[in-house]
Image: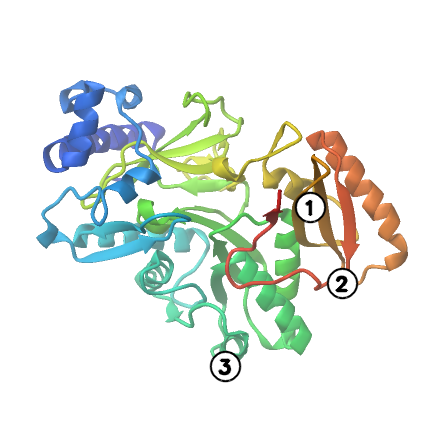
Amino acid sequence: MQEIKTEQDLKDIQLEGLKWTVGHVYENSPFYRRRLDRAGVSPSDIKSLEDIAKLPFTEADHLREGFPFPLLSVPVEDVVRIHSSSGTTGKRKILTYTSKDLQDWTDFFARAFRMAGIGPSDRVQIAVGYGLWTAGAGFQAGCEQVGAMAIPVGPGNLELQCQFLQDMESTCICCTSSMALLLGEEINRRGIKNKIKVNTIIQGSERCSDSMRRAILEHFGASHLFDITGLTELYGPGPGIDCKEHQGIHYWADYYILEILDPDTLRPVKDGEIGEMVVTTLRKEASPLVRYRTRDLTRRISGQCPCGSIFPRHDRILGRSDDMIIFRGVNIYPGQIDEILSDIEGISSEYNILLERRGGKDFMIVKVERDSTGDPAWDEDIRNHIAKEIKSQVMVSAEVQIVDYGALPRTERKSRRIYDQR
């Protein structure tokens, strides 16, 4: 692999990979060839990185329409594994992998582990799903590549998780943020915090607020919590992670090009502005991505990270463009409420938003848990403070309800925040 020392090195790798990908899909994928021909683009048109703007977009519906192997760009005999991502409607999205794809995935996942400081002295408890899902296989392969001990417990089962945390003396746990909170609360309930040795938490799959991050670290007594990104279409988890400076997600720009575009105009946004992540793979053989709309929202972080890494950064995932709700004519992303609540003292990290329609009007109810040590006497002040901040920052009125700590549902999977009953 070419050594990367400068931004120009990265750009050279990206241009070479972009040319290869466009040529590869044009020659080997009927789906992509049709798309490129319709757009009037041929591989010879790609002469610079700016030429990526000539390429057509790929969307999730394209993966379902071509079921079972929609983006296949190699002979089916070269496929050694599939993984699947479920959708809200229709058929599953099936992604294929060659041996080289799996090795590439393992290599950059190992890079993510190393950035989090994980190595041969660590014992990594993997509390994510295995099977059709990409998570378990990806975490385990990367863990073994860096020489750490993999403890493949899988998701859920708090009794088993707590037992292994103690018996195996796990130093790192990998899970969703919802699972991390659930397990952390269970550790405290059992009074075993002084019996576990977790120093590092690596979490992904869903947005995690600052208040939730603080709660998780406190529950475990850990030093670092890392956000790892990923989606099945882009190999799986591992294409980006924050470093110990925790000032943004470093992403592996030698494996894919990241564009951040306005989800409505599909034009680039300025650095620091929120937009949709659009990815183009540079080495993927079996199921390459050409300008794939992930629907994930983030913003680019300019400048070099204090950690010294050459790899560029984007912010944590701020939500999804298709998660936007329209309330009384105002476009709202759940992450906006999330950020407001993270700055409020006296409440836990858990909340729900209920949207109802009464008498022809929309109403928003925000249910927030009181902190575990909170005094109910302060509920009214906190309720008014939250309502005022939502009105000021989001420009809508909300009915705020303070409920007891632990009253809102917990899950080891992704937490559901929005209940739209209109």
| Left or right: 45, with 373 as reference point | left
Please report the residue visible at 27 percent of the width from the left and 51 percent of the height from the top.
94
- As rendered, which of 149 and 386 lies closer to the eye? 386
Say whether disc 3 or disc 1 marks the residue closer to the N-terminus: 3
**Picture coordinates of residue 21, whole percent (x, y):** 20, 34
| Left or right: 215, with 42 as reference point | right
**Picture coordinates of residue 160, whole percent (x, y):** 50, 78
Q: Amino acid at mark 2?
A: Ser
**Picture coordinates of residue 192, whole percent (x, y):** 63, 77
Q: Which residue is mark 3?
A: 167
In this rendering, the label closer to the viewer, 2 or 3:
2
Q: Which residue is mark 2?
A: 372
Q: Secondary structure at mark 3?
A: helix
Q: Secondary structure at mark 1?
A: helix
Residue density around tag 3, few if under 14, some if 14–19, many if 20 or more, within 10 Å: few
- The answer to whether the residue labelled 2 contacts the one labelled 3, judged by CB atoms less than 8 Å apart, is no
Q: Is residue 122 above or below residue 191?
A: above
Q: Which residue is mark 1?
A: 342
Q: Is residue 389 above or below residue 47?
A: below
Q: Amino acid at mark 1?
A: Ser
Say whether disc 2 or disc 3 marks the residue closer to the N-terminus: 3
Say whether disc 2 or disc 1 marks the residue closer to the N-terminus: 1
